[in-house]
Image (spheres, rainbow, N blue to C red):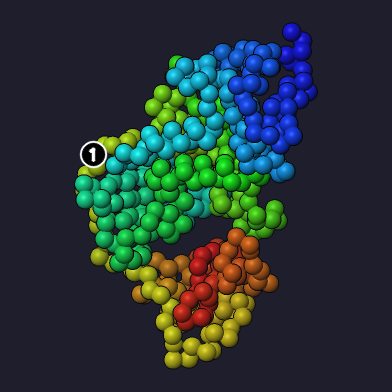
Amino acid sequence: MERFEDKNWLDEALTEAICSEGKKPDFEKWKQEHPEAVEMLASRADGKPSAPTRPLNIGRIIMKSPITKLAAAAVIIIGVLVSIHLWDRSIPSASAAQLLQDAIDAVSDVWSVYMKARMRTLPRDNFSNIGLNYDFVDIEMWKHTNTNGQMQWRVEKSGRVLLMDGHKTIMLIRPNYGVLNKRPLPLGCYDSWSGRLLNVHDLLDNELQNAKNNPDREVCLRHEEVEGTDKIVLEVNVTTSVPENDYLRNKFIQESDHVKVYQFDAKTKLLEALQVYVHTTDEDVLIFEVTDIEYNIEIDDSVFTLDFPEDMIWRREPEILPDNKRYEKMTPTEAAETFFKACAEENWEEVLKFWTASRIDERLKAYLGGLEIISIGEPFQSKGYSRKGWLVPYEIRLKSGGVKKHNLAIRKDNDANRFVVDGGI
């Protein structure tokens, strides 16, 4: 029985099953020819481990070239073949792709979804913004499709709400800044990364296609027992193209190396939970998790409406100014200096030329008015930011006496072709 714990022996057997002269794998034949491997995998699958705090990467399958796509899919099949057979008697053998397809089919008739989640983010900041040391902020999400096929959805955290009522899309950054688009935009607009999760069918289908077509993606599929119920756990590792020394690295999920851990009910194949961990040199940090999902529930119409304060300020796209050429020619440094100088002089008409709003809010005037510029640093760009966007280091002293040191995000991908402030205040 010592042979059963010889990893090299098992690896050789698996390699023989999937890579022999490039032939199509015959798993039934492989099981007959390798009863010891089947017995070993079966004994492991019979165990009933408790759910770990961070799911272990047991059974991770790394799909890399030059293995063909068919062989890569075969690796997944081998990894889960016996365990699935044992704990789901109705499925004699299955692959990760088939299980994902089952999960997709399970949500094909879903007409409403409600999710509760939490994320390490800032209440009023971008929906995709994360910070490895931020506190968790609660997020709620709703999606409903009526009998006429009209969809409505809402994504909300304490400082920001985004909703589509079937006709228009509105984002409210509390207390009184709004963005209005008179068209029904899809989930995921305005960087609402978590909102895409409401499209469970598309979410899983995307993972299925990636599993089939991306040989460099790491996939792990396993069975667990959680509180007496069989679960299917799918882990997907994602590697970002943003360099490690980039300013925006780990400031958004898309700009991080991370693993998504999906949990499905083994019987219904419905998605029940999702966790996202960001990989760092020291540890994996839990950055996002869905804590509750409900399907096909009645959602009150009031969820898809918003009440606005009387002093609402609406986003306005930059207009071409009479002296627009002057602003078009500005370098990132000149734009930052002009903006902060206008704040220092409380020249709000000039500030508005750099601000995408119908007017300057009184709170912003009180915050930035009368500031003192200490320094403006050398502008730089980030691979994770707009091609026409720059980050300008600055240090200012506020009228209150406090010192603010940050990077002003400015971009000029607009019809007026001039820099406007995009963040970092």
The x, y position of residue 161, in whole percent, is: 36, 54
- Mark 1 is surrounded, within 10 Å at the Cα level, by few (under 14), some (14 to 19) or many (20 or more) other residues, namely few
In the image, taking residue 178 as reference, residue 50 lies left or right, namely: right
Image quarter where the N terminus lies is: top right
Residue type highlighted by circle 1: Glu
Q: Nearer the viewer, residue 160 or 88?
A: 88
Query: Observer-nearest residue: 391 or 185?
Result: 185
User: In the figure, is residue 34 to the left or right of 186?
Assistant: right
Q: Residue at x 46, y 67 (%)?
A: 367
Please report the residue visible at 25 percent of the width from the left and 50 percent of the height from the top.
149
Residue ID at (73%, 14%):
4
Q: Please tell me whether residue 278 is drawn above or below residue 170 in the rendered image.
A: above
Helix or strand or loop: what does disc 1 sit on? loop
Residue 192 percent location from the top left of the image: 44, 53
Residue 268 appears anywhere in the view? yes
Query: Which residue position is annotated with label 1?
Result: 298
Q: Residue furthest top?
A: 1
Taking 302 as reference, is 408 above or below it?
below
Side (left or right) of 296 relative to 8: left
Rendered position, 76 above or below 129: above
Res 50 visible: no
Question: Depth check: 104 or 49 in front?
Answer: 104
Snapshot quadrant of residue 267: top left
> Where in the figure is residue 44, as x and y percent of width and height?
62, 15
The x and y percentages for residue 169 are 32, 60
Depth check, front residue: 386 or 6:
6
